[in-house]
Structure formats: C-alpha cells, structure tokens
Image: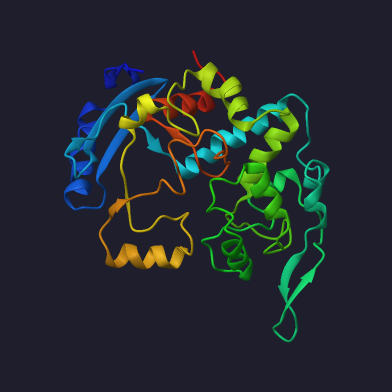
Amino acid sequence: MSVDVTTPEEVGVSAARLARIGPAMQRYVDEGKVAGVSTLLARRGRVVHFAQTGWMDREAGRPMAADAIFRIYSMTKPIVCTALMTLYEQGRFQLFEPLAKYLPAFGKVKVLERGPAGDEVLVAPLRPITLRDLFLHTAGLTYDFLEESPVGELYRAAKLMHSTARTLEQMVDDLAQLPLAYHPGSRWHYSLSIDVIAQLVQVIADMPLDDYLQDVLFGPLGMQDTGFFVPATKRNRVATMYGRHDLCGVGVTFSLVEEAWRTQPPTRLDVDATYPTDNDTTFVRGGHGLFSTAQDYWRFAQMLLNCGELD
C-alpha cells in the first residue's frame, strides 16, 4: 500500500523541522545503534513525513524499504486489546467480572509469597483476577525475562514463551497452573496478561484470534501486510533482526540484555525459532507475534485517534 504524503504546512507542520528527522536517524545508523529505521508522522489524518534510513539487511547491503515488514513484538498488544474491547462494546463481558468466569483454571490460582522464615509459601489471592486487571497489568502475572519475583524463574522453567509449537490456548492453560507473583490489584507489573486477553478473544468470540483480527480490524482497516505469519511471496520484505539477545530465547533475562546493551554492539539475530515467519498454525499470541508495516500500523493508530473509524 502506498502512502500519500501531504505538504506539511497544509496541516500546520513545519517542513524545516521535519527535515531534522533524517539526519538524526542517520546518526543512529552511523553510530551502530540501529541498522535501519522507517519513520512516519501524520497530523489531522494526513501523513506529512515518511522516510527510510539505513539498512533492511546490513550484510547484504539492502537499504530499508518503504514496504518493509517488521516483527512488531509488543506493538501487538494494543491491537489485541482493541479486539477484546470490540467485544466489550457488544456487551459480551464486563470489565469487573472474574477471569475465572471465562477461563476456569484461573479460579484455582495461588500467590507465591515469602513466609516469616523466608521460605516460599502459596496463599489464596485476596481477591480474584478481573478482566480489567489484565488490561492494566495488575493481574499478578509476570514475564519470563523479569527477575523481581521467583515466579519469573518458574515461567522460564515452563518455557512459556519459548515454544511456538504450543498453541495460545495451551500456553494460557500452562500459565494458569503457575502461581501469581503478587495479589491481583495490588501493583502494576508488566506481564503475559495480554496473552490471556488474546485467549479471551478466542473464547468470547468463539473463533480463532487471527481470524477475528482479520475480520474486525485488519480487513476493514486495509492492513494488508499485518498478521501472525508472512506469506512466502512477501518474506523477502521482512526486515532482518538486530540486537543483543533474543528476548524470547531460553534463559534470557532482562539483566542479561541490559548488560549486553552496555558492552556489545547490536548484531544480526536469528529469531525464527521464537518468532517464525512461516508458522500459520500454532504461533498466535497476544503480547507479541504480529508482523506489520509502518503504513499498516499508522492506519491502526489513526483509527484509534479517530475514536474508532477510518476512511
């Protein structure tokens, strides 16, 4: 999909200030902080800047392309949350309902605490997880790569994020067998809660998540290059991954990644094992997993800014 770029002054934007973006992005590339960048800026529903800098594949000498397809990782989350909220608008659930009403396994979950002697004990949560908690990251869940709670180590041992052969339903079922890191509603903590939201979409809509996203968001918004896998005819457009570690890899923690950022330049990464381009059967997630382009994601963001409509 092509993007029509408006003369900036037509929507009150300074072309001279926009001209600073390219050199700034080029500095990031020249300093080795990133391999390539695609930047898009819009105002009042009209694109005023769309440019590419650096490399889509540095080793092959392929410049960043306007139609490059990216692994968008956590930018999957707003899309999946929007999907569940369309079901809320239909009156299919209420935000303060207990999660266990729709996913009964979470009705038995315990909280892992430290006892008076410093030992780990399992206690009943002070209140149930609500659907609202999932949206707010206050459900008591955590992430594999976070280390503040011993529950993170249990996640890593269970390899919750590491097997793309495990379906979303299987992953969430496994998650429900593990304890919570804290009592629901007691604190904010970044977590796998949006993956649980993704499973809720499947349960409440009674259809696969990828199909629901296509029917309700991607199709109507014209997001032609967004999905959980990339067709063979488009895989030459997937941008190469560069970084220090695969955050979804076995045994990778945030402290390990932070240390690598301080001491190592970004290098080419093979993340196909954890974020495959060709798995169109089991790799459907809520917290990461989508592929998209700058143009497609702009259309999604513009729809949100327009309070739910586009074109």
Question: In this view of the protein, can residue 20 be seen by the observer?
Answer: no
Residue 134: x, y in percent?
Answer: 67, 47
Residue 308: x, y in percent?
Answer: 58, 22
Name the residue at the top extreme: 311
Q: Is residue 244 left or right of residue 186?
A: left
Q: Is residue 285 left or right of residue 107?
A: left
The total of numbered circles placed on residues is 0
Residue 249: x, y in percent?
Answer: 46, 57
Of 281 and 311, nearer the camera is 281
Residue shown at the point (42%, 20%) measured from the top left: 45
Q: Quadrant of residue 204?
A: top right
Residue shown at the point (52%, 33%) measured from the top left: 280
Q: Quadrant of the N terminus?
A: top left
Q: Is residue 203 left or right of residue 39?
A: right
Residue shown at the point (61%, 36%) measured from the top left: 81
Of 107 and 135, nearer the camera is 107
Q: Quadrant of residue 206?
A: top right
Residue 95: x, y in percent?
Answer: 75, 39
Residue shown at the point (20%, 36%) measured from the top left: 62
Q: Is residue 68 above or below residue 165?
A: above
